[in-house]
Image: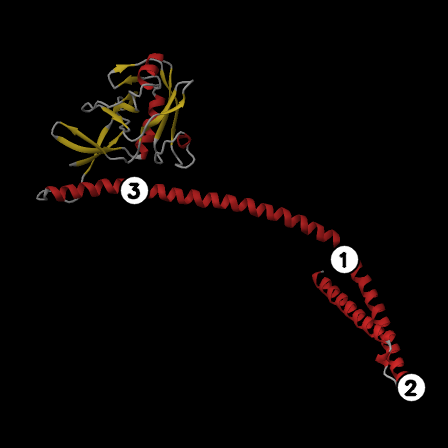
Amino acid sequence: MRIVELILDEAQSMMGIEAISIVENPAIEENFLALKSDEIKLAEVNKEKKILMGALLIPNKPIYRKAGADEYYIYFSKETVEKASQLYLKNGNQNNSTLEHKHELSGLTLVESWIVEDTKFDKSRKYGLDVPVGTWMGAVKVNNDDVWNEYVKTGKVKGFSIEGYFADKMERPQDNTTGLSEEEKADLLLSQITNIVKGEKLELSLIDDINRAKNSLLADISIINEAKKITDKFYSTLISEIPKAKERINTNNKIYEAAVKKGQLALDKQLTFRKAAKELGIEATSNNDYNKLVDEQMAHKKEWEDLQQVNDLLKKLL
């Protein structure tokens, strides 16, 4: 079983998507493509405005096809999906629509068309649609009450399909499968399909990692900017306070010097009192006033020593 990549051959004037069909089960015609996104439901963007949203083409998604006895898989690359979406609008086909690829419809218009670039923040996520990066999304305005009431509201149509012509680009395994058992051929086919899907998942994973890293940096930038503002304000305050700080240091020095002198005077008074008490044969500590002076002198010394220490720290900061 082969895998076929469908591409757009711009040299062929008929190439591209001609119409969007709303379908339940798409009809497949040989050489004429009519695909439905089986896993992707339509989202009713606005019931009053009658707008539907859904995936039109999903890249790198293996799709089983059977034409007579021929069984194969097809898929579209991201490049082909994007090119198809652009060519559809370029050719002015946004008003072309059908029902089940059989009946032409009027009043259906593609009013929005975009390629999903971010699975987390894409508009489709708002409506519960989970599609991979590279998906062609579309929103269709239904200005046809019969279609809306009979097919959309009743759930008879469940997805979008595309109608158009593509060229085949074969992708075969390098090794000749002749002589392989059916089980070996199946394993080989599964490996090819897995490689296509893994490539998409790997890219999505990397993009998610990049977006997470980007969002983390953005959040950190906000924190850094706030820290800068606070620091700048603090710095400005410090700069404006430097003259006051220098003045404070000078004042503290004077207070310190005066305190040392007063402390020394109090110590001299203690020595004089102890000498006189000794001559009288009594203990100086038996006098309450002397004891209070000693206590106050010790407390006073601790205070001016602390002041000296704080003053020295302030000098170092300047």
Pinpoint residue 212: horizontal percent, then vertical percent: 44, 44
Callout 2 amino acid: Leu
210 vs 154, left or right, is: right
Q: Residue 280, labelled with which disc?
A: 2
Query: Which residue bears the numbered disc 3?
Result: 199
Callout 1 amino acid: Ala
Q: Nearer the viewer, mark 2 or mark 1?
A: 2
Using the numbered discs, state the Cα–Cα distance from disc 2 to disc 3 in whole angstroms: 107 Å
Q: Nearer the viewer, mark 3 or mark 1?
A: 1
Q: Is residue 176 visible?
A: no
Callout 3 amino acid: Gly
The quadrant in which residue 40 appears is top left
Q: Is 245 situated above or below 274?
A: above
Query: Which residue bears the numbered disc 1?
Result: 245
Q: Residues within 10 Å of mark 1 (few under 14, many from 20)?
A: some
Pinpoint residue 111: horizontal percent, then vertical percent: 40, 21
* First in sequence: mark 3 vs mark 1: 3
Pinpoint residue 156: horizontal percent, then vertical percent: 28, 20
Q: Residues within 10 Å of mark 3 (few under 14, many from 20)?
A: few
Residue at the (14%, 42%) spot, across then down: 185
Residue at the (51%, 44%) spot, across then down: 219
